[in-house]
Image (tube, rainbow, N blue to C red):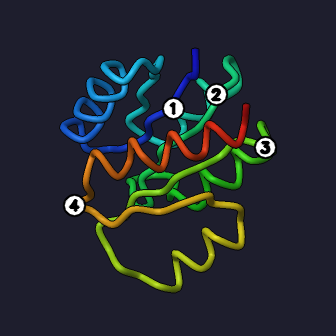
Amino acid sequence: MNSILVVDDEKGIRLLLQEFLKKEGYSTTAAANGEEALLFAKEHTFSCALLDMRMPGMSGLEVLVALKQLQPTLPVMMMTAYGEKELIEQASNLGVTHYFTKPFSILEVRDVLRKILQKEV
């Protein structure tokens, strides 16, 4: 079973993604911040991560760099409420597989996730 790491400081988004992904047949782990996400990533291997760009404490980019050090081949999708081209470019250079602008379509997340995971298999 594919295991997805969901990292977002907004509880509502974490719960929405977790519930939806569980219904789609994925195992999910949710983290409220970067530090928590990295603790989980040290203990578990994930198939993919959904990561918020802007969080208190560690930024999404900092978490991305640390995740890639722990699991270099981990596909990471980033979510941002901001259409900030500079951050998106930085994320792309750091190995982000895909990004979504909030509010995003949950069905789009599902479709992109399926495509990413099919490449992994």
Q: Mark 3: which amino acid? A: Thr
72 horizontally vs 12: left or right: right
Q: Which residue type carries mark 4? A: Pro
- Labelled pair 4, 2 in contact (Cβ < 8 Å): no
Q: Which residue is mark 4?
A: 103
Query: Based on the displayed image, in which of its 4 quarters is residue 91 positioned?
Result: bottom right
Tell me the quarter of the image containing the N terminus. Answer: top right
Contact between labelled residues 1 and 2, with CB atoms less than 8 Å apart: yes
Disc 2 target residue: 46
Q: Residue at x 50, y 58 (%)?
A: 59
Closer to the chain start, of discs 4 and 1, is 1
Q: Quadrant of the C terminus?
A: top right
Residue 60 lies left or right of residue 45; in this view the side is left
- Which one is in front, 113 or 100? 113
Q: Helix, strand or loop at disc 1?
A: strand
Q: Secondary structure at mark 2?
A: loop
